[in-house]
Amino acid sequence: MKYDYLVVGAGLYGAVFAHEAKAAGKKVLVIDKREHIAGNVYTEKMEDINVHVYGAHIFHTNNKRVWEYVNRFAEFNRFTNSPVANYKGELYSLPFNMYTFNKMWGVVTPQEAAERIEQQKREAGITEPKNLEEQAISLVGRDIYEKLIKGYTEKQWGRPCDQLPAFIIRRLPVRLTFDNNYFNALYQGIPMGGYTAMVANMLEGIEVKLGVDYLENKAELDAMADKVIYTGAIDAYFDYTLGSLEYRSVRFETEVLDTPNFQGNAAVNYTDAETPWTRIIEHKWFEFGTQPKTVISREYSSEWKPGDEPYYPVNDDKNAALYAKYKELADKEQKVIFGGRLGEYKYYDMDAVIDSALTMCEHELGQ
Ligand code: UDP
């Protein structure tokens, strides 16, 4: 065997494992079917602006171990995510906070806002929310659900809100304070110089082969290493023998505009049902850019089909049941560890992926 570990996928999970394995004195080969490292956090310069090629990634965490870890590979700026919602030309602050409630209802005090939400929840008669729609209405009331949640969520997931799991909306804070910070996180920021540079630092001194498709050359690649860390889609690994898991895919239309400022914010969500895109990202604002031009990406959500990039696992009951069956198969693969958003079919944030990779390293590398 030439290598101790073959790492399939040069995204965050793979890069963290590769880094730790090398530090533990192991021989590691990282491969990726794409022509670049960093998976979906990959950034690329356009007009001197770091463009988040696979969608906006804002690093945020409450996990000190993870925060200290990423700071070893990049310096983070003070970016705080405060998206704006555009509903048919009306602008609202996100996440749901006193600015949002004031604009929606004209309420001024937290008490008035709380009463408004309570009244709308009562009228809807929801006691135990069973799906995303009921969860949303009981958190913020029907008006906000209709204007800021329903259209956006149904575009993003391609499914009616009453058929989506409630946990998706619980990712978003609801606050009776004037606080536009989208995340309840102690630590937040964007790696200065882009995510690609951060991942390149993690992979420093490690052999990386790009444009190599593991599943197409599996036998040959497996023969090169004692163990495999697989971060691709778990159903693809098993050649979809039990059926396909569902994913959402995202497509971006990226444009360079000859203006220094298009929308005045990194993220504007289009929350009505009619606008075909879910959001527009203006990349320079992640790094307080002063470039003369700007780069924007319109984001369109679609159901994944073979040949597309899988982005979001659809963690509903049906898919959870199918994943559980794939997981049983995965557990029987002695030589292979499955990890990351696709390998574990889990709607992981970046910090959670890194945490799970570090925990796996402790078991696997005995650190
Ligand atoms: N969401 C919404 N309106 C918004 C933003 C988010 O209803 O303007 C809901 C939507 O259901 C979405 C979920 O909150 O799927 C999580 O959004 P988040 O921004 O965390 O998703 P991500 O950035 O991972 O795509």
Image (spheres, grey):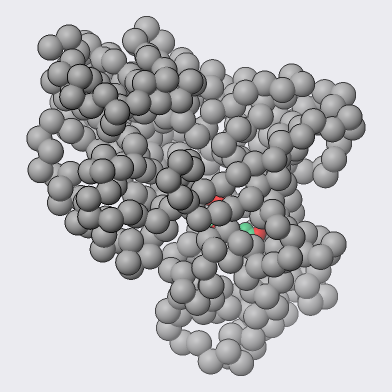
Q: Residue furthest top?
A: 205
State whether residue 280 is above or below residue 89. Answer: above
Residue 97 location (% of width, % of height):
68, 63
The N terminus is located in which quarter?
top left
Q: Residue at x 21, y 35 (%)?
A: 337
Could you tell whether 361 is left or right of 353 in the image? left
Residue 151 location (% of width, % of height):
65, 67
Q: Residue furthest right?
A: 259
Q: Residue at x 26, y 15 (%)?
A: 28
Q: Residue at x 23, y 26 (%)?
A: 218
- Residue 46: quadrant of the picture: top right
Could you tell whether 53 is left or right of 49 in the image? left
> Where ligand 1 lies, by image quadrant?
bottom right
The C terminus is located in which quarter?
top left
17 vs 158, nearest the viewer = 158
Q: Is residue 244 visible to the viewer in this orientation of the structure? A: yes
91 vs 155, nearest the viewer = 155
89 vs 175, nearest the viewer = 89
Residue 127 location (% of width, % of height):
46, 87
Could you tell whether 200 is left or right of 79 in the image? left
Could you tell whether 299 is left or right of 86 in the image? left
Q: Residue at x 69, y 40 (%)?
A: 253
- Residue 353: quadrant of the picture: top left
Residue 129 location (% of width, % of height):
45, 80
Q: Is residue 181 visible to the viewer in this orientation of the structure? A: no
State whether residue 321 is above or below residue 146. Answer: above
